[in-house]
Every structure is written in C-alpha cells, then in structure tokens.
C-alpha cells in the first residue's frame, strides 16, 4: 500500500511513534511518504520505499502567522497525485487532521478518493485541542476522519468526554520494537562514565514542559539522594529546564543532577539507568516510560491518563497521585534499596514492555488501514 504519513518531526512522542510506524510498515513492503516541515528526527533511513516530502511555508510580509495548514494540504494534494498515494495517516489532530481533511476535499473534486486515518496522541485532546480556540475544528476533523485511533483507552474516554464525537474510536496502543533490544547492542554501557559503582542512576526524559512536572522530578530525586548514593540524568530540552537547574542549585544537589540536553542516544542512557521518573500531570500513554521499560528500567510514575495501562503497579514500578512527591520517593527507595528487588522490577519492566511489541500492534494498524480503505468502495 502507498501511505502518506503526516506528523511532527520533532522529539515529541507522536512524531516518534509516527516515524517508527512508517519504518516498520516500509519493512513489511508498504511504500511510505512522510510529509512534514522538516526531516523527522527518528527517520534515519531513507530508501526507495521510505520518502520524505518537506512542506515549505514561504515568508510573506502580509502574514503575521504563516499558513502552515494551507501549505500542508496543498503539499498533500501534490504528493498524493504524483505518487498515487492510497491512504493518508495523520498523527496529532492539530492541525494535521484539519489539513488532511482539506486535502481529501480538494482531491475529491478531481475524482480521487483518499481515506484518512487520524491518530490522537494526547495533548491534541487533553490540553491544546480542548481549548475553545481549537475545539470546533478538532471536533470537525475527528468526525470527518474515515477511521480514528487513540493511543490508550484513557485517551479514548477523554476524547468522548471533551468532544461531541460521532465516529468510533479504536484503541491502538503505542509500541516498541523489542527485537532491537535483544541484540545487546550496547555492551559498552559506559555506566562508569556517569556514576560510581555504588551510585544508583535515575533518569527522566521529556520535552520539559509544565505538564511533565519537572520540579517534582527534582524534588523526588532530592528525597532519594538523602537516603542512598544516586545521580539524576535529565534528558531533553524545554521551557522548564532553567527552573529545574535553579531548583537543583537551591536544594544543593547540582553536583548530582546532570542535564544532558536533547539526545539521539536515549537507549545508551537507558541501558545504564536503574529507575525512570515520570511524574506528569497528564500523560495519554507515556512512550518514554515504555522505552525505559524495554531497556529493563523500573518506572516511578503518576497514575494519570494512560500511565496505568503501561506501568504496572508493584510489578514494573509504582504509580502515585499527581504531586505526591513523598510517596513517589518512598516507592523509588523501596525498589532501589534492595538489589534483589531492583533486579526483579527491572526484569518485570522488560516483560511488561513486551506486551507492546510491534509484532502485536502492527496488525492492529493494518486492520485499521483495511477498514479505512473499505470506506472508499
Ligand atoms: O508529551 C509529549 O512528550 C509529547 C506528546 C506528543 O504529542 O508528541 O506526547 C503525547 O503523545 C505520546 C505518543 O503517543 C504519548 O506517549 C504521550 O503520553 C503524550 N503526551 C501527553 O499526553 C502529555
């Protein structure tokens, strides 16, 4: 099948999922065309059946805001016609589903029927999309998609709660390619470069937005390091980074907190991590927790959104109410203070992650595509 995928090309989870999905589909023989404003960060292998089409939005003095949706929908029309695309899969409703719908309509005028699958990822529903500025357009785009998927049951429920949806929503969870982690690629784990033998390594990865409660990450770690020797790896960039650096300073733990910036070597960092912290305010799925788990890293998270569908309480880690720093720190210590318990949680984390192996999730997407194609007959 020839499929166009629209996504954000940045480090966010939705772009990562879209890119990994496209690459996996290409391996299964589909022809994949990524259409977005820059080269997706995880797209490292272009080939005859993986193509990238850049959406340009030329500057024009009259425009206060550059009309990206317009450029994207026009680009989609051109790519669909030039390459005979049979299906469009848009990730993140804003503005991709809206632009996709416009492309569909323009193509319909020329007698081309393009089925569109929209995948909802989280903040497009729970934070941004729910705002009155966008709500009518988001509702319209979801209702006018041929098939809609959400990355967790919790996100499906939120979508039905916040919007007037008449379309079915199918839950297709995010996934991970477990086979990549079987090869023991990082035998040179280089743990000793980061910490002493006796220190435990705790990691947080995100885009450092408010929703991630970065201050809670620092405060949980502050409590942990009072009891055991430990280092905190802060991976990512974003608006809350400076606050986090200041807070670490204020708490006098700067020497134990390493800000590593945005990294292309997430798996190398996770391979020497003992524990992953994700104390988010909202999280529709928590792909970063799943990436930690597949690397055998236990997870301390909140119990918000789709996190309970990913992190199993008392098995792969522990879950607490949003903001309960003391409980999250106590749970972290329960895992970290005893080597046997730590080993058990690490093994369990890997086993739970295997439920989300791409082998199990890919057929769900292929069924969704079949269903979308049926809408054109
Ligand atoms: O929150 C992020 O880190 C980015 C955001 C995105 O859209 O790129 O992530 C959302 O989609 C991810 C992939 O489906 C999910 O794993 C994240 O839980 C979700 N983020 C939120 O719901 C806050």
Image (cartoon, rainbow, N blue to C red):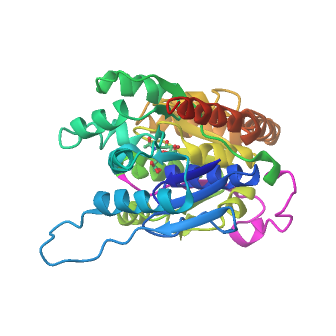
Q: Quick check: is 206 in the magenta stretch?
A: yes
Q: Nearer the viewer, residue 79 or 336?
A: 79
Q: Is residue 325 above or below residue 295?
A: above
Question: Residue 316: which quarter of the image?
Answer: top right
Q: How many marks?
A: 0
Q: Is residue 72 above or below residue 370?
A: below
**Percent x, y of residue 238:** 40, 63
Q: Is residue 37 above or below residue 223?
A: below
Evaluate whether residue 9 shows in this view.
no
Evaluate whether residue 311 shows in this view.
yes
**Percent x, y of residue 337:** 71, 42
Magenta segment boundaries in residue numbering: 181-209
Toward the front, the furthest residue is 111
Q: Nearer the viewer, residue 277 or 256?
A: 277
Q: Is residue 142 left or right of residue 207?
A: left
Question: Residue 362: which quarter of the image?
Answer: top right
Residue at horizontal 67%, vertical 26%?
314
Residue at horizontal 45%, vertical 57%?
8
**Percent x, y of residue 282:** 41, 37
Residue at horizontal 57%, vertical 29%?
371
**Percent x, y of residue 36:** 45, 62
Q: Of helix, strand and loop, which mostly describes the magenta segment?
A: loop
């Amino acid at each position: 099948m020839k499929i166009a995928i629209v996504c954000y090309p940045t480090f966010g989870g939705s772009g990562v999922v879209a890119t990994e999905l496209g690459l996996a589909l290409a391996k299964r023989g589909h022809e994949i065309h990524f259409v977005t404003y820059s080269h997706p960060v995880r797209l490292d292998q272009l080939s005859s059946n993986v193509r990238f089409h850049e959406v340009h939005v030329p500057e024009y003095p009259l425009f206060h805001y550059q009309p990206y949706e317009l450029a994207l929908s026009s680009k989609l029309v051109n790519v669909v016609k030039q390459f005979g695309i049979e299906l469009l899969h848009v990730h993140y409703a804003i503005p991709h589903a809206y632009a996709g719908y416009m492309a569909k309509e323009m193509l319909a005028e020329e007698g081309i029927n393009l089925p569109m699958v929209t995948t909802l990822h989280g903040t497009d529903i729970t934070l941004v999309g729910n705002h009155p500025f966008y709500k009518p357009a988001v509702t319209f785009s979801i209702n006018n998609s041929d098939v809609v998927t959400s990355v967790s049951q919790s996100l499906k429920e939120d979508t039905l709660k916040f919007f007037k949806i008449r379309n079915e929503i199918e839950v297709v969870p995010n996934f991970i390619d477990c086979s990549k982690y079987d090869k023991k690629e990082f035998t040179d784990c280089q743990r000793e470069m980061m910490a002493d033998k006796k220190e435990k390594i705790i990691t947080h990865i995100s885009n450092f937005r408010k929703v991630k409660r970065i201050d809670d990450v620092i405060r949980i770690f502050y409590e942990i390091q009072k009891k055991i020797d430990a280092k905190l790896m802060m991976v990512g960039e974003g608006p809350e980074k400076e606050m986090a650096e200041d807070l670490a300073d204020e708490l006098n733990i700067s020497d134990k907190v390493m800000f590593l910036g945005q990294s292309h070597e997430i798996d190398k960092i996770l391979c020497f991590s003992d524990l992953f912290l994700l104390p988010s305010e909202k999280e529709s799925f928590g792909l970063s927790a799943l990436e930690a788990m597949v690397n055998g890293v236990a997870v301390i998270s909140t119990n918000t959104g789709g996190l309970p569908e990913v992190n199993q309480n008392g098995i792969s880690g522990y879950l607490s109410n949003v903001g309960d720093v003391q409980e999250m720190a106590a749970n972290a210590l329960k895992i970290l203070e005893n080597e046997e318990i730590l080993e058990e949680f690490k093994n369990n984390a890997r086993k739970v992650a295997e439920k989300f192996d791409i082998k199990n999730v890919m057929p769900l997407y292929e069924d969704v595509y079949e269903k979308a194609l049926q809408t054109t007959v």
